[in-house]
Amino acid sequence: MKRKQKNRRKQVKKRQDKIAAYENEEFKDIFRINQALRMKDYGLLREIGRQSGFVSDPVRRRVWPFLLHYSERKVKREGSLNIPHKDEEQVKLDVTRSFNTYPKNVDDQEKEKLQGQLHRVIIHVLRSYPSLHYYQGFHDICSVFLLLFGEKYACQLMERVALFYLRDAMFATLEPVMKQLTMIDSLIRLEDNELYEFIMEAGVLPYYALSWVITWYSHDLSDLEKIARLFDLILSSNPLMPVYLAVATVISKRKQVLALPCDTSTVHSFLTNLASDTDIDTVCEQAHALEARYGIYELQSLSTIPLDQFSVVNRFEQDYLSIDTLEKYNEKVSEVIRITRQEKYDKPIELTAIKPHEATQSTLNKLLMHKEIYTVFTIGASLSILALWIANSSLIR
């Protein structure tokens, strides 16, 4: 009798535990993710990544490769791993500055080991596709993949990220990225004109968001879990998502921004450091909502800044979302290689808007005028030097 009662109590507890698990939001998310992986439902996984993210690193290790069309079979490559890439000296310099904020509590020996692995990951990508141009900040994204997946898988996954997400930043010129930065101002204007006018009056250009956009915030945040959550969203979205995230970040702090003295160095300084004190879940939610209101083509039209028809933003659907076999992947890689060999983008998509927005065009012209200088400052130099240069630059006058 006692044994029966004991068994009954165990069964009741099991049912209660099961009910509690089903009511747990994290359990529900993992259940949906597992279901999507079993069904190979690419669309559902992207939806989850955009809405709530992939919960934990063990889950990400299963989902990100699926989203990136990973295969252990041989894939199409442009170059040879035995032939050095022209940008390898710069890679060395950046790698020696890596792993200073994350992971935490790493001793010098472990840090040196990670730097060696990171160097090999970056070199693997560049030598595999020598038409890609390295930029400062690419190493930040590579470091996140290295920490999550290890060297072998990071090499394979970063090939796909470089070709199908970061291609505009790895083009022969920085013009595609400058155009995307200009859209930040346009989107702030569309969403919050008071905030936009304040930033314009302060004479601040959207360079404050450059590292957010080209490193997916991995240069600006020290919490790897927050960075991974942002990567969940970006890998589940069009490559323009970092622009929506940048706008969501600024708007989330509108009260603090509007309370600042309206001068260039103060406002630029504050905006540059915004990412480190941001509620990531809220920003992800707002960025998702912004994209729903202003899709990639509508944003280009409303901002009167057309990206090139070969831009990774405009080709993402036909290049990447259409991949369903290894053969299709290799076919698309061949097309992308031809694009990366171009010296410039000179075929902007046609827009429905007729008259360019005067302030937007002015911002773009200023960005293009000093793009090389700002890239070095924003990623490589200290904030104080950058703020001093801005305050004395004719660029903002």
Image (cartoon, helix red, strand yellow):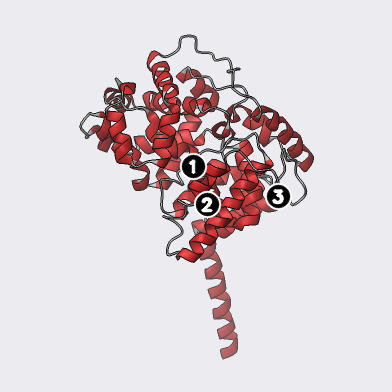
Q: Nearer the viewer, mark 2 or mark 1?
A: 1
- Label 3: state its secondary structure: helix
Tell which tag, 3 or 2, sits nearer the viewer.
2
Q: Secondary structure at mark 1?
A: loop
Labels 3 & 2 near each other (Cβ < 8 A): no
Choose top left, top right, bottom left or bottom right for residue 236: top right
* Residue 365 shows up from this direction: yes
Whole-percent x and y of residue 302?
47, 19
Badge 1 crowding class, 10 Å Cα cut-off, few under 14, some 14 to 19, many 20 or more, is many
Name the residue that disc number 3 marks. Answer: 39
Work out which residue is located at the far top of the displayed protein and give it.
354
Quarter of the image where one finds residue 197: top left
Give the residue pinned by disc 2.
144
- Name the residue type under label 3: Met
**Residue 74 percent coordinates (x, y):** 77, 47
- Residue placed under numbered mark 1 in the picture: 137
170 on left or right of 204: right
